[in-house]
Image: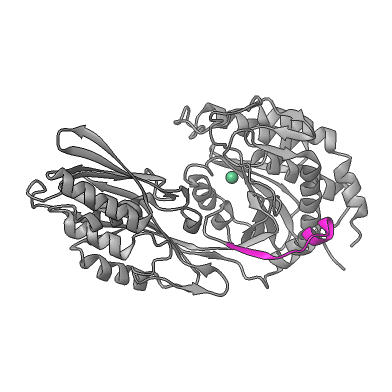
Amino acid sequence: MNYEKLDQIVDSKREEILKTMKKWLAVPSVQAPRSAENAPFGKDVRNMLDIALADAKDMGFDVKEFDGYAMHAQMGQGEETMGILCHLDVVPAGDGWTHDPWGAEIQDGKLFARGVVDDKGPAILTLYAMQAVREAGIPLKDGVRLILGCDEETGMSDMRYYAAHSDLPTYGFSPDAEFPVINIEKGGLGLLLGKVTSGDEESAEIPVYELYAGERPNVVPGSAWAKIGVKDWDAFAAKLNQVIEETGFELTLEKIEYGVYRLTAIGVSAHASVPHLGKNAAGMLLIALKKLGAGGASKEAIACLADIIGLEGDGKSLGIKQQDELSGALTCNLGILRYDQKYLSARLDIRYPIMANETEMCGKAVESAAKGGMHVLKASSHGPHHVSADHKVVKGLLKAYTEATGLEGYTIAIGGGTYSRCMPNTVAFGPVFPGDIDPCHIADEYIDIEKMMLSARIIARAIAELAGKNE
Ligand SMILES: [Zn+2]
């Protein structure tokens, strides 16, 4: 198929696209508590949904609304339905903006706004891409359906609701991540290693009164601290200096009251899916405490956690290290560490390759944790999401991408989860280009307007390529 005409039609919509962007991006569609029967995520998200419904209807698509959870806009019917999945909710603006986060300001060819990339921008581009395919007169063999959810950022309950109330597309993509194509998302397993401690701390040489690191399992803690008792200062100071020398760790000590200190480890924070990019401060603290011989009732568990996890991001000593050719290596992050003299717990965020066996991994973790007298609880679990690189959707998207950009097309496996896992045979496809910074969730979220238009052309070509009648 010759896509030159299609490209031209998409490009002719530039001003209209920018106008719609301004309108949609002005709505602070941050999730809030239910404000009405049909507004499960608050009035701003509801308002955004109403605007999207009205615009999609004006553009001539068949729209349907799902009780404030989601909507869809469809053109055509066919044997199959191609789904394109975007969301209307955004994360809060946060601090540090140099532009009005709801102003859609343009400067130096860039459009700044919360949601311009994640994910209202791609939703708008898809609507205009659909319109362009229709105006180009490209005959369709499949229906094309844009699905817009209202709860991507805080739990994806929108797509569970949608799946319960609508038929689902048979294949598709979600422009809510990056190009070229993400076809593998590792499985996720959250484990809690815990121990009820009943002995006393006070009789220990270096009692541990409290441990604290991390707020969320999916972040490598950048700092961690222990409230400890010091009975023999000289002996302790000598030991601590030795530990610092041996490990090279950044450890600081601060007096809280007579004989009680806060020992802090400083590491480097990172996302749990890429633990090698950080340095786990909780692991550092555990190793340091073990070397100091710290802890009374907590001693055994602290030493065990230092041994079976420590600074490892690959689950090696826990016994679960593995990788497969398609999805890469397992990652394991110690995200939260707590102790209050009653219960000691370590929360792990594990992302495993598609060939891994969850039952086996849990068994290994139970075995390893038992060495420190700890039990293991499964806190969360979701299977991997995988669409074969040979599937027509992957092939069609890569073709559209390569032909529109001249760039190499390839598939990517990631440890994070994207919206695409909510739908069958659906992969993540754009809008961030390889090598570009990912501006999602940060201050001054922006899109380069030329690249925005390129994304629109890619989406239009993808629709034509996959849902169009190709003779
Ligand atoms: Zn998103």
Query: Residue at point 22% right, 33% down?
Result: 256
Q: Nearer the viewer, residue 373 or 292?
A: 292
Q: Is residue 136 visible?
A: no
Q: Nearer the viewer, residue 265 or 431?
A: 265
User: How many numbered marks does the figure carry?
Assistant: 0
Quadrant in which residue 33 is drawn: top left
Q: Is residue 405 visible?
A: yes
Location of the N terminus by quadrant is: bottom right
Q: Which residues are magenta?
A: 401-413
Quadrant in which residue 56 is drawn: top right
Query: Residue at point 57% right, 39% down?
Result: 441
Is 407 a magenta residue?
Answer: yes
Quadrant of ligand 1 in image:
top right
Is 223 a magenta residue?
Answer: no
**What is the basis of the colouring in this image?**
one colour
Residue 84 at x, y = what percent?
A: 67, 52
- Residue 379 to residue 214: above or below: below
- Residue 155 to residue 350: above or below: above
- Residue 413 to residue 121: above or below: below
306 with respect to 248 (left or right) = left
Residue 9 at x, y = what percent?
A: 89, 45
Query: Residue at point 17% right, 52% down?
Result: 295
Residue 36 at x, y = what percent?
A: 48, 28
